[in-house]
Image (cartoon, rainbow, N blue to C red):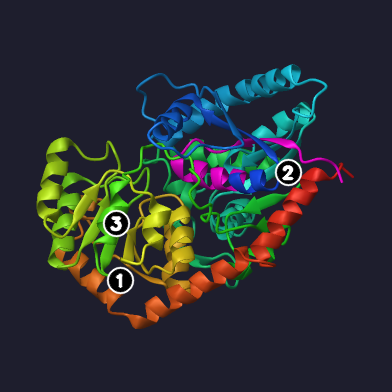
Amino acid sequence: MAAAPRVLVLPYPAQGHVIPMMELSHCLVEHGVKVTFVNTELNHGLILGALATTDNKLAGIDMVSVPDGLGSGEDRKDLARLTDSFSKVMPVELEKLIGGINADARGSESIISWLIADVNMAWAFPVAKKLGLRAAGFCPSSAAMFATRIKIPEMIRDGVLDERGWPRRHGAFQLAPAVPHIDTSEFSWNRAAGDAEGQPVIFQLILRNNAATHLAETIVCNSVEELEPGAFALFPGVLPVGPLSSSSGKPAGSFWAEDATCAAWLDAQPAGSVVYVAFGSLAAHDAAQLVELAEGLALTSRPFLWAVRPGSAGEELLGRLRTVAAPRGRVASWCPQRRVLAHHAVACFVTHCGWNSAMEAAASGVPLLCWPYFTDQFLNQSYICDVWRTGIKVPRPAAAGGGKTGIVGREVVRDKVEELLGDAGTKARALALRDLARRAVGEDGSSRRNLEQFVDLMRRSPS
C-alpha cells in the first residue's frame, strides 16, 4: 500500500460548493491525506478573513488561490458572468499553479498526485491528465441532480428538452423510478443564470463538464445511499460519503464570520421552540418579501432565529426586521448552521433547500419549510416534501403583471409554520432520517465504507 497522497481540491467558486469540499478535505486529512485547497482569489480572502475571527484553524489543509478573471467589484452572484469568466481564465491558471507547486516539491513526497474537482469544474480533469495527475470528481449536490445533468442527451433525444436545454415537454418529469418528480420548467440550468440571456453559458458549461467526467477515476457524492436509491442505481460507481456535515468544531470555509452569540441565545430558549430561518449564500428576496416574512414569523408567537446574509439587506431594512423580530426573535448575520440545527431548542428550519442545508437538517432530524430559489433547490424540495416527507412547501403565488412569483403574505408564513410544527408525522420521519444518516457515517455504515474505499483508491498505484 502506497503512502497517502497529496491532493489538490477544487470547488466551484460559491459558498455552497466550498463547504462540502472543505468537509471532505477534513475527512481526508483524518485519513492521513495531504490536502491543498484551491479557491478563487476573492473567496480565498473571504475565508481567511472569517477564520481570523475564530480560534479554529484549517489544520492539515493548505490554502491557495487562483484568479477568476473578474475585476474588483464585479458581480460574482451573476453565475453566468462568473462561469463565463472562470471558464476562460482558470484552466491556464490551474495548470500554472500545479506546475509551480510540483516544481518546488520535486523529489519529495509533497508532489500533488491527485486532483479532486467539483463535477461542476470537470473542465479541470483534462488539465490534471495533461500534468500526469489522477483525477476524482466530487458531487456537492444530490445524486439525482448529477444524474439529471448527465442524462441531458437522453432527454434531448426523447423530446423532453430542445438542443438548448429548454423544455419541449411541459409538466412533471421523472428521470427514473424512486427519483423525485420535477417540473420541466425547474431544471437547474434554466434556473441558475437569473435570466434567459445567461442560460446558454450555464448549459454549455454543463455539457463540457459532462464530456470530461469520464476522465475521473471515481466520483464521490455528499449524499447517503439509502436516501437516494433510485439515483444511485443509475450510477452505481458513484460513492456516497455523506452527510458531510459532522466535522465537529472544524471550520468549513465560511465566507463570513459566524455570529458566535447565536448559541447563547439558543441556550436560553425552551427545547423544540425555535423557528430557524436561513436562505443560504445566494438566494435573494426583495425588501417587501423580507418584511412580510418577519411579520409572519412574529405572528407565530414563537422564538425565531433568522440568519440574514451580510450584504443581502441594507441597514435601514435590517433595523426594521430587528424591530419586528423583537422581543422573541433574533436577526443574526451569519450563523454556524450545523451547530444551530443540532441544538435542542430548534423546532424547524425555513430554508431555500440548498443541498447542504438539506443534508445538515437530515443529520439533525429537523423538519423543513421549503422555499426554493434557484438551481437544484426545486429538485431538493421534491425529495424533502414528496419522497422523504420531512417538510412542506411554501405556496408561491403568481405575480401580477406576468412575473414568476408574487409575495408570500405574512398569514401564509404563520400558517405554514404552524402546520409544520403541528405535524407529528413529519417530525417522526425527520428523526428517522437523522438515524439513517447517523448509521451511514457510523461504524461500518455505507458512507464510512465508501470514504475508506475512496482513500484506498488514492493510495493504490494506478492499475
Q: Which of the two discs, 2 and 3, labels the residue nearer the N terminus? A: 2
Mark 1: which secondary structure?
A: loop
The residue stretch that appears in magenta: 1-25
Question: Taking 448 as reference, is 222 left or right?
Answer: left
Q: Which amino acid type corresponds to the residue marked 2 in the rendered image?
A: Ala
Instruction: Say whether marks 2 and 3 touch (CB < 8 Å).
Output: no
Q: Nearer the viewer, residue 260 or 96?
A: 260
Instruction: Say whether disc 3 or disc 1 marks the residue closer to the N-terminus.
Output: 1
Quickly name the residue at label 3: 277
Numbered tag placed on residue 216 in the rendering: 2
Q: Residues within 10 Å of mark 3 (few under 14, many from 20)?
A: many
User: Where is residue 361 drawn, in percent x and y?
Assistant: 43, 62
Looking at the rendered structure, the kind of residue marked 3 is Val
* Classed neighbour count for the residue bearing mark 1: other residues with Cα under 10 Å, few (<14), some (14–19), many (≥20): some
Residue 283 point in image, percent of width and height = 34, 46
Label 2 near label 1: C-beta < 8 Å? no
Secondary structure, mark 2, is: loop
Disc 1 residue type (three-letter): Gly
Pointer 1 residue: 272
